[in-house]
Image (cartoon, grey):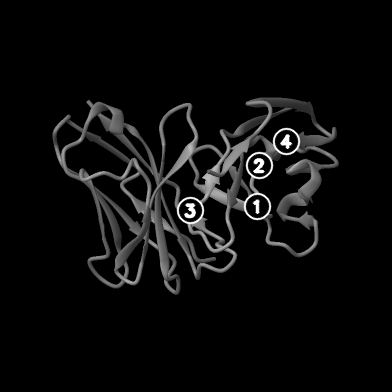
Amino acid sequence: AQSVTQLGSHVSVSEGALVLLRCNYSSSVPPYLFWYVQYPNQGLQLLLKYTSAATLVKGINGFEAEFKKSETSFHLTKPSAHMSDAAEYFCAVSEVGAQKLVFGQGTRLTINP
Amino acid sequence: EPEVTQTPSHQVTQMGQEVILRCVPISNHLYFYWYRQILGQKVEFLVSFYNNEISEKSEIFDDQFSVERPDGSNFTLKIRSTKLEDSAMYFCASSEGAFENIQYFGAGTRLSVL
């Protein structure tokens, strides 16, 4: 069965610093991969997706993620953190042709002024 | 921008009562989903729905749960006899198609079973 592991349930960075949120998946074939963000009292918003095109994927709000098949990873990065980036971030995976998303446990990102 | 709408935002119920959670998916979407997130745990898939029938469901989605698209716009999740462990945030999602599976989520309904 598919699984997703997000290393670090809580990440704290200073404003202007690099943001790195880690995600590893288990799959025998390259799946579809997603990052979602959840702001307080809001739903899950799609940040970016990987669907077997370019391995470096750019998303909204300056975020990007790189698909590395050899490492089964899909880490999310942003060069310079902004206070508005504070939220919970979820990595998710689906197998090609499948419908359900399998989520990681989420990483809460805190930005320090 | 089109969005998935869920009502109510918070539902409080007594154990054993029936609840219906409502969702209005994005209008041109054909696939509908329910997920739940128990406090402190992962977001878990419950069920997917296409062409007026369940296309996939998880082990969580037992006989206590049912889904329905009663008209052209609403998509509902019914829990027949709620248990304490049903307390969770329930998310509805929809997607235009199955290809690439980009699912758009609502803000969720927080269900509290007392």
Element carrying mark 4? loop
Q: CA distance from mark 1 to mark 4?
A: 13 Å
User: At label 2, which amino acid type do we have?
Assistant: Tyr
**Which of pointers 2 and 3 lies earlier in the amino acid sequence?**
2
Q: CA distance from mark 4 to mark 3?
A: 21 Å
| In the rendered image, residues at marks 1 and 4 fall on the same chain | yes
Q: Which mark is residue A100?
A: 3
* Residue bearing mark 2: A25
| In the rendered image, residues at marks 2 and 4 fall on the same chain | yes
- In the rendered image of this protein, does residue B30 appear above or below residue B67? below
Look at the image and tell me whether residue B43 can be seen.
yes
Q: Chain of mark 3?
A: A
- In the rendered image of this protein, does residue A22 appear above or below residue B92? above
**Which of pointers 4 and 3 lies earlier in the amino acid sequence?**
4
* Residue bearing mark 4: A22
Give the mark toward the camera: 4 or 3.
Answer: 3
Q: Residue at x 85, y 32 (%)?
A: A17
* Residue bearing mark 1: A33
Q: CA distance from mark 3 to mark 1?
A: 12 Å
User: At label 1, which amino acid type do we have?
Assistant: Leu
